[in-house]
Amino acid sequence: MERRRRVVVVGAGPAGLAACEALRAEGFAGEVDLVGAEPRLPYSRPPLSKKFLADRTAVADPIPGAERLDVRWRLGVRAVRTDLGAAELELDTGQRLRFDGLVVATGSRPRSLPGGEAPEGALTLREVADAERLREALAAGEGRLLIVGGGFIGCEVASSAVAIGAEVTLVEIESLPLERLLGPIVGELLAEAHRENGVDLRLGTALQRLTEDGGRLTGAVLAEGERIDASACLLALGAEPATEWLAGANLAGADGVECDRFLRAGAGGAIVAAGDLARWPHPLFEGERLRVGHWSNALDQGAHAARALLGAAAGQRPFGPVPSFSSSVHGLTLRSLGLPGLGTSSGLLEGDIAARRFVVGYERRGRLVGVLGVNMGGRVNGYRDRIGSSLERSTQRTNC
Amino acid sequence: MSIQIEVDFDRCESHGECALAAPGVFEVDDNNFLQILVAEPGEDLRPKLEAAARACPTGAIALKG
């Protein structure tokens, strides 16, 4: 085991929380500082795009066990810089924290529009404060919500918003929602579900610009010149790693923090990374370097990274569980195992597409790399052992 | 003493993340309903139960005791 005395965990989301817990579970008795930008205990993020928006009294649920962590909490505080030479972290309060072990877990942030300031009323969704702003905009009840981007966040928010009576236009540049990630079967179903539920779905078109009047959002102009009136806009354009505080330390690459198989990011193993920003070679996917932005991945990686930091036995195995992800859109539960987005072909594995209960498989080079179940959460787990290891061609192929 | 599992079935959407985190305790059946398979889970199952509660995307699982 490495002899460390003072570990700083930066990022109080699921990865940071799991890292702190694992440090203590491994018997680390030194100091642990947990630095979190939001002024609240680590909380469950997936409901923010769903139930949270529909219920004005909903509050963010702390992640079970968060209140029991044995750490020095530094909440409402941001890391602004890290100095590896001095082994110091600088906070936005001006305070400096020494460390001999650092867990990098600051996650990601929503992508914004390229260039220029978005007008008031253009929202993004990541944190509780974002969800509260979106909820207020929906509750104001006047005018239309324009959602730019038909990924998971865009689809989930569209679904939550129409369920409480809002008018919604969803603009997606691809020809079907989530098509690039989940293929045409699921994309068609999502498009159908949006339309059935009253979402004004605009596919294969892009946002040209948002329009405003005196700083206040009035709508948008689409690529073909069509105008959409809207009183609020959600930019759901995906997420990018939140790594600017690492810039001087040469830890962050163009797409996150580059890690080895054990999630070690540098300084001879004194720095590890976990969660949305960690890029590592995943053993199940031919060692391809990946970032995985799933909730459960952040929890698993946080614990693994902490064990690697301590040199504990469990941290000396490569990190490689099968990723798992869940979403719900217009009452359809979508559950994936593995990484469907890596697939180059997809096909029905079981169930009935018309009945909206089925499992789709995704293959690359003859291997099953992921599955996605619609309203079949129970069946999806059964594919876990086949993902990544399967060499047989098991899906009925369709081209996509 | 056993742990009490409370599932809020108004929230549960049968994603099956709990069944992945704690197989043998949770199962989504063929009718897409969540079943709890262990009536009185003991302390030895706590880490798995906590992992299941955390993994739940709808926050439907609470542990008491």
Image (cartoon, coloured by chain):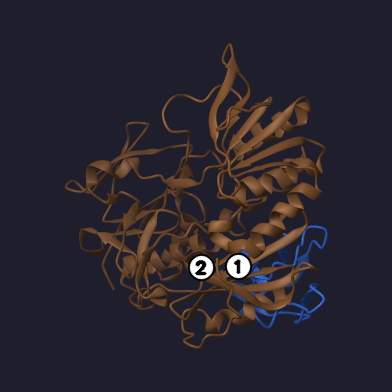
Chain colours: A brown, B blue
The three-letter code of the residue at mark 1 reads Ser
Q: Position of residue B6 (x, y in %)?
A: 77, 66
Q: Residue at x 46, y 84 (%)?
A: A389
Residue A57, percent from left and from top: 77, 39
Indicate the chain on which mark 1 is placed. Answer: A
Q: Residue furthest bottom?
A: A392
Pointer 2 residue? A339
Which label sits on residue A230?
none
User: To which residue does mark 1 refer?
Assistant: A336
Task: Identify the image quadrant of residue A373.
Answer: bottom right
Q: Residue at x 61, y 52 (%)?
A: A152
Is residue A212 shown left or right of residue B60? left
Q: Are marks 1 and 2 on the same chain?
A: yes
- The reply to whether callout 1 and callout 2 are in contact (CB within 8 Å) is yes
Q: Quadrant of the N terminus of chain A?
A: bottom left
**Which is nearer the eye, A131 or A145?**
A145
Query: Where's residue A259, x and y in %?
Result: 31, 62
Q: How many marks?
A: 2
| Residue kind at label 2, given as amino acid type | Leu
Q: CA–CA distance between discs 1 and 2?
A: 8 Å
Snapshot quadrant of residue B65: bottom right
Q: Is residue A61 left or right of residue A323?
A: right
Mark 2 lies on a secondary structure that is loop
- Badge 1: residue crowd in 10 Å (few <14, some 14–19, many ≥20): many
Q: Can I make out residue A68 in this image? A: no
Residue drawn at the location 59% of the way across and 81% of the way down: A395
| Kind of element beneath mark 1 | strand
Picture quarter with the C terminus of chain A? bottom right
Tell me the crowding category of disc 2: few under 14, some 14 to 19, or many 20 or more residues within 10 angstroms, Cα based.
Answer: many
